[in-house]
Every structure is written in structure tokens, then in C-alpha cells.
């Protein structure tokens, strides 16, 4: 149980184009999903918290118009990197939380490696 | 701000030996801690968790120890196997209400055959 699917796993795009990344919870419903960014050999940096049916909450320093997040259903959240530039190249990872007894555990997707040329 | 950090960025262990990965945290109000394992090119995988009202929790070949007095967390892996080679992150949850995790810097564990 608690499987999170992320697609695509790898994408290459030209500078100026937009890229959409999907995050799906396959066997549970997730009211809350999270989007992280990870640079090589570094830890995960939270970009935003995505709540079903409402606007995402972005962390300080993350441009909401640059990284559009939509949480259309309890099993799907999408991250769109708009007008991507080489500095947006990174490993993007989503997670979805579920749990019992008042404790929710975040389960992670396999990540999406974005390369902007 | 508050952060979670690790003492050792890299650790090499002989296959079959036990390994200990350490984590220091600074937010004394944190309620909940998780260890994740991340293999190259993949997302983090949940290993084990512990609540702040406990000081030890065991899983299959793994044990997490929590010392709230010195704000220290450790992950012990028994009888290490080549598949244990990965980067291990500790993460803390300061507030059950917003579910936001703060991740440590990570330790790369390499199992030597």
C-alpha cells in the first residue's frame, strides 16, 4: 500500500517551454501532497504544500507563477514549470501523506529529472 | 531557522557489519521523526518512524533511537547488505497540524562487499 506514482521520470525541454509533472496516489486518497526540489548531493527542499480543492501554499522564495500547482482530485496533483530555463534543471519529487492514529506519513514518488537546454 | 543536520556525510561499512547513522536536531518541540532511504535517482523511501514520547523503536533489521535530552536521533542497521547502500535522511515534524517535514542533510552509506 501507499504507492505514489510520478510521471514523467525524466524530461528534457527547450528553454522557454513549460513542463507538467504529475503526482498520483495509487491506492489511497491524499488530501495533502507536497512538492520538493533536490539538487545533486543535497537534501530535499520543500517548494509547496498542495491541498485538494484549494490553492497551494508556497515556501518562501518559491515563485508561485513559475511553479504552478494544481490539486484537482484526492489522488492527483500536478506541478507545471512555466517558461523553464536552465537554472530550473533539477530533480523534482512529490509526496502524498496518509496515515492513521493522527500521524500522517509522507510517501514519495520516484522523482522527475528535469533538464532544460 | 531551525534545522536538522547530520554528523557524518559519508559512511562505509563492511557487508554483514552493523551501521549507525546519526542525526542532530535543534527544534526541541518536534513531535515526530522519520528516517528515509534514498537510492540514486529515486525518491525517498520510508524506513521507520518514532514519536517524541518514545526513545527506541525497532523494525526489521533497523532500530531508531531518540535522545531528547541532547536532541539526537540515530538509525541502526543490523547485518548490512549491499542493498542498504543509499543516502539516508532524517526528517522531523515540528507540527502535526501542517505536516511539513524538515529534512536533514543526508548521509551516504556505502556497504563494502
Image: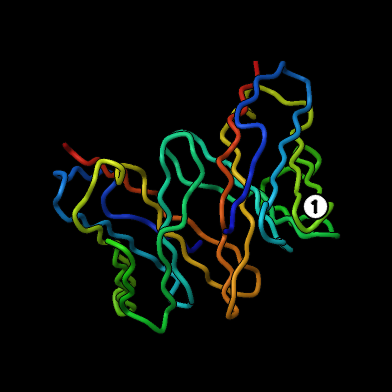
Image height check: is B105 above or below A86? Answer: below
Q: Position of residue A110 (x, y in %)?
A: 55, 41
Q: Quadrant of residue A85?
A: top right
B62 to the left or right of A94:
left
Q: Is residue B30 left or right of residue B79?
A: right
Quadrant of the image occupied by residue A22: top right
**Residue A108 vertical position relative to residue B30 in the rendered view, above or below:** above
Residue placed at 48% from the left, 77% from the top?
B29
Mark 1 packing: few (<14 Cα in 10 Å), some, or many (20+)?
many
Relative placement, left or right, of A75 versus A72 is left
Question: Is residue B40 found left or right of B77 in the rendered image?
Answer: right
Q: Check the image and tell me how it is coloured.
A: rainbow
Relative to B110, is B93 above or below? below
Quadrant of the drawing holding the C terminus of chain B: top left
Residue that extends furthest to the bottom in the rendered view of this protein: B53
Q: Quadrant of residue B22?
A: bottom left
Rendering coords of residue B93 (x, y %):
52, 68
Residue depicted at x 64% and y 56%: A96
Subunit of mark 1?
A
Dot 1 falls on a residue whose secondary structure is strand
Q: Which residue is mark 1?
A: A71
Residue located 33% across and 74% down the image: B57
Amino acid at each position: 500500500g501507499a504507492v505514489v506514482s510520478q510521471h514523467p521520470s525524466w524530461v528534457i525541454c527547450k528553454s522557454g517551454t513549460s513542463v507538467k509533472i504529475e503526482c498520483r496516489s495509487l491506492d489511497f486518497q491524499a488530501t495533502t501532497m507536497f512538492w520538493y526540489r533536490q539538487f545533486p548531493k543535497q537534501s530535499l527542499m520543500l517548494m509547496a504544500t498542495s491541498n485538494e480543492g484549494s490553492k497551494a501554499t508556497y515556501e518562501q522564495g518559491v515563485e508561485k507563477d513559475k511553479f504552478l500547482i494544481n490539486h484537482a482530485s484526492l489522488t492527483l496533483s500536478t506541478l507545471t514549470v512555466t517558461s523553464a530555463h536552465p537554472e530550473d534543471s533539477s530533480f523534482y519529487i512529490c509526496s502524498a501523506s496518509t496515515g492513521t492514529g493522527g500521524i500522517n506519513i509522507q510517501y514519495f514518488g520516484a522523482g522527475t529529472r528535469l533538464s532544460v537546454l | 531557522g531551525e534545522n536538522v543536520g547530520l554528523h557524518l556525510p559519508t559512511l562505509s561499512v563492511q557487508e554483514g557489519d552493523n551501521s549507525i547513522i546519526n542525526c542532530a536536531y535543534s527544534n526541541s518541540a518536534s513531535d515526530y521523526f522519520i528516517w528515509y532511504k534514498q537510492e540514486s535517482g529515486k525518491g525517498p523511501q520510508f524506513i521507520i518512524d518514532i514519536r517524541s514520547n518514545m526513545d527506541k523503536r525497532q523494525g526489521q533489521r533497523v532500530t531508531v533511537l531518540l535522545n531528547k535530552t541532547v536532541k539526537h536521533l540515530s538509525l541502526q542497521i543490523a547485518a548490512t547488505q549491499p542493498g542498504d547502500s543509499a543516502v539516508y535522511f532524517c526528517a522531523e515534524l515540528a507540527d502535526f497540524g501542517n505536516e511539513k517535514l524538515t529534512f536533514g542533510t543526508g548521509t551516504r552509506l556505502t556497504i563494502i562487499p
